[in-house]
Image (cartoon, rainbow, N blue to C red):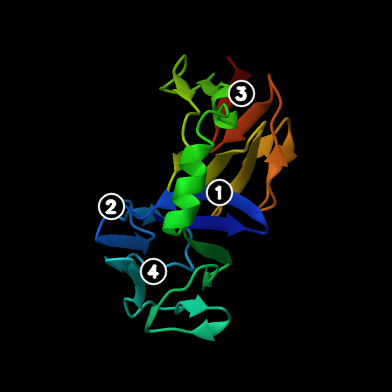
C-alpha cells in the first residue's frame, strides 16, 4: 500500500496511508491530508489511486505543487518521489507486494510504537481549564486557527512542538518558532493567552 510522509525542515509531522481512491490535500480541515499553512491552498492537490498506480493532480493551487523540484499539474508518482507544497515536503512511498510479504513475515517482532510514551496537554487557564487533550495522533494541533496554532508531533520516543501561522506562543517563557522544540514532562505552554502543561501519563 502506498503512503505519504509529510515533513517540514527534516522533521516528519505525519504519515498518511493512501487507502481511498481519492485523497485530497489542502489547508481546509475537511481534506484527508490537512496542512494548516497559508502557503497551502484550501484545496491544493489530489492523489488518485488507480490499481497500483497513484496520480498526483494540482487543483490550480496559488503556489503550485512541485515533484522532485519541477512544477507538476498531473503526473504518475513513482516510489521515492518528493512532492513540495510551500515549505512542506511529502515523500511518496509505494510498497511492492514483496515489501508487504517481508513485513508480514516480520510481524512477530514487537511494534516499537506500542512502547512510545503516552502524554497529554492539560489546560490550566481559560474556559477549558482542567481539560486534558491526549496526544495519541501523529500530530495534534492546539489553539485557534488564524490567532495562534501550535502543532505537537509524536516522534518514536518523544514529542516536539512548533508553531504554524502567527501568534506568539511560548514554551516555559521562551518563544516557540517554526523550528520544532522538544517537550519534557511538566513543560508549560502559553498560547493565545491560555496556559497549558505537557504531561506524560
Residue positioned 50% across, 43% down in the render: 103
* Pointer 1 local density, CA inside 10 Å: few below 14, some 14–19, many at least 20: many
Left or right? Give the position of 153 relative to 21: right
In the rendered image, the quadrant that contains the C terminus is top right
What mark, if any, has residue 117 been given in the picture? 3
Tag 1 secondary structure: strand
| Among numbered discs 2 and 4, the one appearing first in the sequence | 2
Residue 49 can be seen, yes or no = yes
Question: How many discs mark residues in the rendered view?
Answer: 4
Q: How far across and down, in percent of the image, does residue 180 sit? A: 68, 46
Closest to the camera, between mark 3 and mark 4, is: 3
Identify the residue position indicated by label 4 in the image: 41
Q: Are marks 4 and 1 in contact (CB under 8 Å)?
A: no
Along the line of sight, the residue nearer the viewer: 152 or 169: 152
| Among numbered discs 3 and 1, the one appearing first in the sequence | 1
Q: How far across and down, in percent of the image, does residue 35 sit? A: 45, 56
Identify the residue position indicated by label 2 in the image: 30
- Which quadrant would residue 195 be assigned to in this image? top right
In the rendered image, the quadrant that contains the N terminus is bottom left
Identify the residue position indicated by label 1 in the image: 13
| Among numbered discs 3 and 2, the one appearing first in the sequence | 2
| Among numbered discs 3 and 4, the one appearing first in the sequence | 4
Tag 2 secondary structure: loop
Q: How far apart are the alpha carbons under marks 3 and 2?
A: 29 Å
Residue positioned 61% across, 23% down in the render: 117
* Pointer 4 local density, CA inside 10 Å: few below 14, some 14–19, many at least 20: many
Relative height, residue 54 to residue 34 (above, below) = below
| Among numbered discs 2 and 1, the one appearing first in the sequence | 1
Along the line of sight, the residue nearer the viewer: 106 or 180: 106
Q: How far across and down, in percent of the image, does residue 141 sit? A: 48, 40
Amino acid at each position: 500500500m502506498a503512503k505519504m510522509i509529510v515533513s517540514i525542515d527534516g522533521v516528519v509531522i505525519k504519515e498518511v496511508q493512501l487507502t481511498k481512491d481519492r485523497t485530497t490535500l489542502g489547508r481546509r480541515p475537511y481534506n484527508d491530508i490537512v496542512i494548516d499553512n497559508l502557503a497551502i491552498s484550501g484545496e491544493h492537490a489530489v492523489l488518485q489511486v488507480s490499481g497500483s498506480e497513484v496520480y498526483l493532480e494540482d487543483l490550480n493551487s496559488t503556489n503550485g505543487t512541485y515533484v522532485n523540484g519541477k512544477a507538476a499539474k498531473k503526473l504518475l508518482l513513482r516510489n521515492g518521489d518528493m512532492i513540495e507544497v510551500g515549505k512542506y515536503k511529502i515523500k511518496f512511498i509505494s510498497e511492492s507486494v514483496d515489501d508487504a510479504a517481508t513485513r508480514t513475515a516480520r510481524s512477530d517482532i514487537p511494534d516499537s510504537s506500542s512502547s512510545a510514551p503516552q502524554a497529554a496537554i492539560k489546560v490550566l487557564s481559560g474556559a477549558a481549564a482542567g481539560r486534558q487533550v491526549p496526544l495519541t495522533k501523529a500530530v495534534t494541533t492546539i489553539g485557534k486557527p488564524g490567532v495562534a496554532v501550535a502543532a505537537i508531533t509524536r516522534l518514536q520516543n518523544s514529542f516536539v512542538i512548533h508553531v504554524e501561522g502567527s501568534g506568539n506562543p511560548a514554551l516555559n517563557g521562551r518563544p516557540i518558532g517554526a523550528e520544532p522544540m522538544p517537550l519534557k514532562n511538566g513543560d508549560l505552554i502559553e498560547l493565545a493567552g491560555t496556559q497549558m502543561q505537557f504531561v506524560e501519563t
